Image: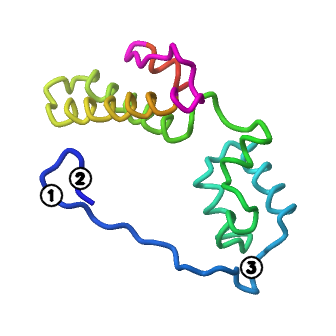
């Protein structure tokens, strides 16, 4: 797959092996894994870091196969998570970091100005998707002035 804003091909990512069953050494107790996900989510971990913690410390190589649903779905069922989707919040944090960089004496940094434009375009595209899905209110708009309030 090609990059969206570059005239070159992108690196291909790794894919998980196509195994239908979990290994015998893995933790397959769905109730215990759900409790771990809820506990880690309340501690403030993201769904990606929860998956890594489950893999590395609790012998759960694939939480989705054990639970039958994604980690973010389990967190949403238990009322854990922010008011914005996690991927959109990560992009907003990135935009805040770039805005801070440009505002602290680096206003001539044209590469990061371009990076900010691209990041904001991604936020707007994601917002359009989430509005159509009903996960954001229909009158939500991206405003650079209010961005820091949304992230904190």
Which residue is disc 3 drawn over?
26
Label 1 vs 3, first from the N-terminus: 1
In the rendered structure, are the residues bearing label 1 and label 3 in contact, judged by CB atoms less than 8 Å apart? no
Residue at image coords 37%, 67%: 13
Residue 9 percent across, percent down from the top left: 19, 61
Residue 86 is left or right of residue 124, and the answer is right
Q: Is mark 3 on a helix, strand or loop?
A: loop
Q: Is mark 1 on a helix, strand or loop?
A: loop
Residue 120 is left or right of residue 66, and the answer is left
In the rendered structure, are the residues bearing label 2 and label 1 in contact, judged by CB atoms less than 8 Å apart? yes
Residue 26 percent across, percent down from the top left: 74, 79
Q: Quadrant of residue 143?
A: top left
Label 2 vs 1, first from the N-terminus: 2
Which residue is disc 1 drawn over?
8
Which residue is disc 2 drawn over?
3
Residue 101 is left or right of residue 46, and the answer is left
- 91 w.r.t. 20: above or below: above
Colour option used: rainbow
Q: Is residue 132 magenta?
A: yes
On the rendered image, what quadrant is the N terminus found in?
bottom left
Q: Nearer the viewer, residue 113 or 121?
A: 121
Residue at image coords 35%, 35%: 122
| Secondary structure character of the magenta stretch overall | loop
Q: How far apart are marks 2 and 1 (CA)?
A: 6 Å
Q: Does the magenta stretch include residue 92?
A: no
Q: In which quarter of the image is residue 145?
A: top left
Q: Distance between the residues labelled 2 and 3?
A: 37 Å
Residue 21 percent across, percent down from the top left: 69, 81
Outermost residue on the front side: it is 132
Range of the magenta residues? 131-145
């Amino acid at each position: 797959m090609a990059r969206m804003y570059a005239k070159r091909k992108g690196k291909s990512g790794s894919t998980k092996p196509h195994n239908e069953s979990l290994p015998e050494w893995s933790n397959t107790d769905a109730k215990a894994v759900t409790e771990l996900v809820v506990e880690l989510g309340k501690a403030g971990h993201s769904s990606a870091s929860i998956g890594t913690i489950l893999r590395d410390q609790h012998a759960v190589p694939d939480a989705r196969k054990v639970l039958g649903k994604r980690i973010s779905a389990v967190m949403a069922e238990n009322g854990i998570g922010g008011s914005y989707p996690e991927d959109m919040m990560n992009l907003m944090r990135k935009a805040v970091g770039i805005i801070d960089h440009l505002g602290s004496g680096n206003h001539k940094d044209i590469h990061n100005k371009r990076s900010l434009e691209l990041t904001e375009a991604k936020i707007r595209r994601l917002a359009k998707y989430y509005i159509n899905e009903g996960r954001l209110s229909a009158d939500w708009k991206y405003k650079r002035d209010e961005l820091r309030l949304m992230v904190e």
